[in-house]
Image (cartoon, helix red, strand yellow):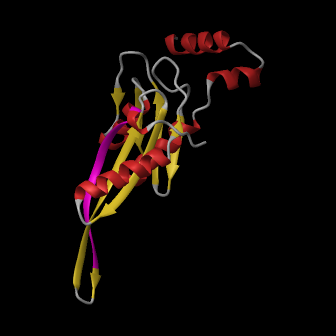
Amino acid sequence: MRVKINPEDLANEVIEIRRVGKVTKGGKRLRFRVVAVVGDRQGHVGVGFGKSVEIPQAIQQAIRDAAKSMVRVSLVKGTIPHEVLGVFKASRVLLKPAYPGTGVIAGRTVGAVCRLAGVDNILTKSLGTNTPLNLARATALGLSQSEPVESVAERRGKSVEDLVEVEEDAQAG
């Protein structure tokens, strides 16, 4: 589900700047590809990329692209509600909820996506290829797949307090 948010409220981070080239009859045509992440640190995050001859233009394109592809992330007490596996092409990212005070235990790419989504405590593991663009997209997809506690409680016919209490007991034991 895509979300529209005011662009001024978004923080952004450039993950990768890569020089790419196209070989033509007249020689090599060099450009820059930039991968960027934007988020409001309150449960919305997006990943995008931009290409241009100049780096600043590529960064602006990447930020615009990321803002268009925003997704909603379910958060419970600064972490995700349950374990999830994000998959995009050959990249796979395992995302696990963590206790308060753990922090964001992740590599540069996955950590940037999690921090801009507003996740304060999470454990992650990259299982597939570590290409920054695919890894960032896999992380965003994984975070968007996390189900809100309210919908799980409704489906199971229980209250939210019962579920959160049960999860806390299971983690303590």
> What secondary structure predominates along the stretch shown in magenta?
strand
Q: Residue furthest bottom?
A: 25
Identify the image quadrant of the N terminus: top right
Please state the horizontal and vertical placement of residue 118, each as a whole percent of the image: 42, 27
For residue 110, what is the image quadrant? top left
- Left or right, 96 with reference to 152: left
Please state the horizontal and vertical placement of residue 54, each as a whole percent of the image: 23, 62
Residue sitting at 46 percent across and 26 percent down?
Answer: 42
Residue 135 seen by the camera: no
Q: Which one is nearer the viewer's eye here, 127 or 163?
A: 163
Q: Which one is nearer the viewer's eye here, 67 or 80?
A: 67
Q: Is residue 18 magenta?
A: yes
Q: Judge whether 130 appears above or below 158 on screen.
A: below
- Left or right, 19 with reference to 48: left
Q: Which residues are magenta?
A: 9-22
Please state the horizontal and vertical placement of residue 26, each as a whole percent of the image: 23, 88
Residue 150 seen by the camera: yes
- Left or right, 112 with reference to 87: left
Q: Which one is nearer the viewer's eye here, 164 or 144?
A: 144
For residue 120, what is the image quadrant? top left
Q: Residue furthest right?
A: 157
